[in-house]
Image: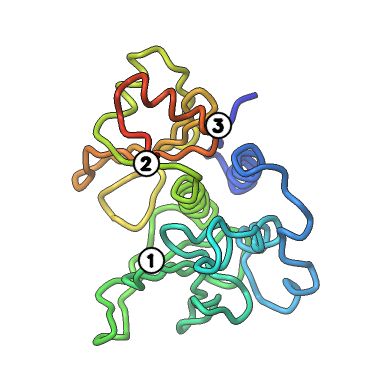
């Protein structure tokens, strides 16, 4: 079965993401989604409502420091009050994700099915009124890029090293493209995700400001043997 997430429309993106999460994290349980009665009380765009319903309460990888499973590097905000912040309005915008140190926020509009996304800039504790930069792609696109990052960063094991994808490819390991050229917080950088031998999720960045280092994570200890075979860090002490 292919794990590739098709980037053709909102349904294909979210369907592919849901399928990949059940592969990567294990079967979804009903309690991992926000109940319909809770969602009915809040004005949400369609793509965000669908993701909250599917995975808005997926248990975190690390207690007690994370609110949900998608709070490993940056933070997907829960609906209700929480120690690390929750979904909230900022002027006309609905803020649903925040950088791990609060450097930027990600927002969308509360209506329509798959609206655009904005990211805050020129903002800090001293200048609390940000300017907002509109991203090129809609909400469902951003959600895929964001959630794959959190799934990778929240894996049981992980590391970062130069040119790992090329090394693994040259060694003959199976490489599957999962999500290509995903838009995220850096205007000049795109994130692509690859699955190596169905065990290792790897991110390669491209663009003017991209670094040579590639991040990767895995949940199965057998992934360490793959990495050892090509002499790259396993992230296991």
> Any mark on residue 99, and which?
1
- Residue 31 visible: yes
Residue drawn where x is 50% and y is 45% of the image:
156
SS for callout 3: loop
The residue pinned by badge 3 equals: 4
> In this view of the protein, which residue sits in the foreground, 87 or 62?
62
Mark nearer the viewer, 2 or 3: 2
x, y percent for residue 126: 24, 87
- Looking at this rendering, what residue extends furthest in the front direction? 237
Quadrant of the image for the N terminus? top right
Where 149 falls versus 165 (above or below)? below
Q: Is residue 46 visible?
A: no
Residue 50 vs residue 24: left or right?
right
Of residues 26 and 12, the one nearer the viewer is: 26
Label 1, residues with CA under 10 Å away: few <14, some 14-19, many ≥20: some
Neighbourhood count class around disc 3 (C-alpha, 10 Å): few under 14, some 14–19, many 20 upward: some
């Amino acid at each position: 079965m292919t794990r590739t997430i098709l980037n053709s429309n909102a349904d294909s993106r979210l369907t592919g993401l849901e399928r990949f999460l059940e592969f990567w994290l294990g079967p979804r349980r009903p309690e991992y989604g926000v109940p319909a009665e809770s969602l009915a009380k809040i004005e949400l765009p369609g793509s965000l409502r669908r993701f909250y319903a599917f995975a808005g309460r997926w248990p975190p990888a690390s207690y007690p420091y994370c609110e949900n499973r998608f709070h490993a590097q940056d933070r997907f905000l829960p609906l209700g009050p929480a120690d690390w912040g929750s979904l909230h309005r900022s002027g006309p915008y609905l803020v649903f994700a925040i950088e791990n140190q609060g450097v930027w926020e990600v927002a969308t509009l509360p209506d329509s099915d798959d609206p655009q996304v904005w990211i805050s800039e020129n903002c800090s504790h001293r200048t609390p009124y940000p300017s907002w930069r509109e991203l090129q792609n809609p909400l469902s696109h951003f959600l895929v890029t964001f959630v794959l990052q959190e799934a990778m960063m929240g894996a049981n094991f992980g590391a970062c090293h130069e040119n790992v994808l090329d090394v693994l490819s040259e060694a003959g390991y199976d490489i599957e493209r999962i999500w290509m050229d995903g838009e995220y917080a850096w205007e000049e950088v795109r994130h692509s995700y690859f699955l190596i031998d169905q065990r290792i999720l790897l991110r390669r960045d491209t663009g003017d400001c991209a670094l040579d280092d590639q991040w990767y994570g895995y949940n199965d200890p057998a992934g360490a043997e793959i990495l050892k075979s090509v002499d790259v860090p396993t992230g296991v002490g």
